[in-house]
Amino acid sequence: MPDSALLEISNLHVTFAVGRRRIPAVQGVSLSLRSGGVLGLVGESGCGKSVTSLAVMALLEKDTASVEGSVRLEERELIGLPYKEMNRLRGSRMSMVFQEPMTCLNPVLTIGQQIEEVLQVHQNLTKRGARDLCVRMLAKVGLPDPERVAKSYPHRLSGGQRQRAMIASALCCKPVLLIADEPTTALDVTVQSQVLALLQELQSELGTAILFISHDLGVIAQMADRVAVMYAGRVVEQGSTAELYANPLHPYTRGLLASRTRLDDLGSSAGRRLPSIQGNVPSPDQLPEGCSFGPRCQYCDGRCQRGMPELTDEGEGHLVRCIRAREIA
Ligand SMILES: Nc1ncnc2c1ncn2[C@@H]1O[C@H](COP(=O)(O)OP(=O)(O)O)[C@@H](O)[C@H]1O
Ligand SMILES: [Mg+2]
């Protein structure tokens, strides 16, 4: 593992207990993110992306979720950290933005009250200092008339404005790590590209590392320098963005890439079905024998059903979990 890793997730397991069912949602995920880097985490809905990120932030319900493995931020182990210390890190060293800002914005407080509270708790600022910094931060995320926005309640803002306000709140203490979980999925295309451009700008200005989660490979390609592909609770492929898109090795990654709607293809392929992966992501408590992707894989044969393939290095940190990767490449 590189010495400079800012975030090091090793062999993370998350199991939910729901009644008598045990749901192994994340099974042995290892990821590493360097300081100032952007790691994309991609996969269809239900693959375990959000659960992985919530485990990093210690935001899973303790009663139902059991978390094992190691999560180190700046070489400090986070798993098992007392609530108070974790709370101090959240918001200051690490923070998170979600698909739906209203899940973390309080509807009965103004935007200003919420951001100023974060600043007062973590930065020891006076009320006046917090107000000034809040307004500057709202201006930085491109909100026109930031003074007015600070006095507004969240519901008075548009979806795109709320997303900008949440980003301001997440970045106001200059965290070293931002986790962005589908931050633009709910926005329409124009606003989505503005918010992505904003995140890129802030990332390079503040040097914040981002764990960027999306089901959209196009968005990931734009944002991330490294990518990890998740399927059914495991990483199935990982590598630099350039390498992975140019030379995808796992049949799942290839399927995701092939099923992307490309605007430049739409004209010529009108009426033609886009290739897509048949079937659905299995539920974590009903995984098939052997390779989890087997039942959906056109290359699956008897060998694939004998056990879960290991994640192996095919060269220069390009990892893949498929015993046939070399044959079919
Ligand atoms: N609190 C929970 N209790 C039980 N199962 C859960 C819980 N949260 C998530 N899961 C299950 O874990 C799996 C991964 O979910 P998630 O991480 O949200 O997927 P993704 O973000 O990739 O769409 C899914 O099968 C989901 O149903
Ligand atoms: Mg999710």
Image: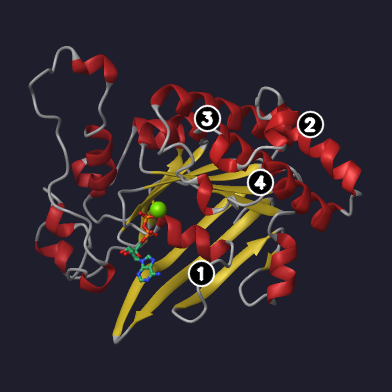
Q: Nearer the viewer, mark 2 or mark 3?
A: 2
- Examine the image and state in which quarter residue 309 appears: bottom left
For image coordinates 65% across by 49% down, the residue present is 177
Question: Label 2 is placed on what type of residue?
Answer: Arg
Check disc 2 and report its element: helix, strand or loop. helix
Q: In this view, does 92 lie above or below 15?
A: above
- Residue 197 in the figure: left or right of residue 128: left
Residue in front for this viewpoint, 92 or 220 = 92
Nearest to N terminus: mark 2 or mark 1: 1
In this rendering, the label closer to the viewer, 2 or 4? 2
> Hey, what amino acid is under mark 3?
Leu
Disc sitting over residue 60 in the figure: 1
Determine which residue is flagged by label 3.
196
Decide if ligand 1 comes within 8 Å of the CB at mark 1: yes
- Relative height, residue 9 to residue 173 (above, below): below
Name the spot of residue 121 as percent of width and height, x first: 81, 58
Query: Which of the image's four quarters has the C terminus?
Result: top left
Counting residues from the N terminus, which is met first, the one under dot 3 or under dot 4?
Answer: 4
Screen quadrant of the N terminus: bottom right
State the residue at coordinates (23%, 46%).
Answer: 251
